[in-house]
Amino acid sequence: MTVFVNEEPLRLFRGASVGDVIMKYSEAIFRDILSKRKIVTDVTGQPLKLQGNIQDGDHFKIISNK
């Protein structure tokens, strides 16, 4: 399946989690999310948990945690 992080398409396996998406996108950003320097959101700006489920075509944004 294909999902998007900051408009960059990524191919992932079915059953992948938000954390899997972010780890594939960038290990450094994954660490920033774990340390709460950044957060991952859906297209509406809602923060997401790394354990959350994903679906084909989902879009995610990485933003600084204020």
Image (cartoon, rainbow, N blue to C red):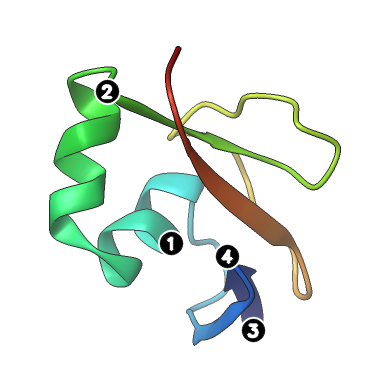
Mark nearer the N terminus (1 vs 2): 1
Q: Secondary structure at mark 2?
A: loop
Mark nearer the N terminus (2 vs 4): 4
What is the three-letter code of the residue carrying label 2? Answer: Arg
Point out the image quarter for the C terminus. Answer: top left
What is the three-letter code of the residue carrying label 1? Answer: Val
Q: Which residue is mark 2?
A: 37
Mark 3, Cα crowd under 10 Å, few <14 / some 14-19 / many 20+, is some
Q: Secondary structure at mark 4?
A: loop
* Residue 61 rendering spot, x and y as whole percentages: 60, 50
Mark nearer the N terminus (2 vs 3): 3
Q: Nearer the viewer, mark 2 or mark 3?
A: 2
Which residue is located at x 86 percent, y 37 percent? 44
Q: Secondary structure at mark 1?
A: helix
Q: Which residue is mark 4?
A: 6
Alpha carbon of mark 4 to alpha carbon of mark 3: how far?
13 Å
The quarter of the displayed image where residue 57 is located: bottom right
Alpha carbon of mark 3 to alpha carbon of mark 1: how far?
10 Å
Q: Which residue is mark 1?
A: 21
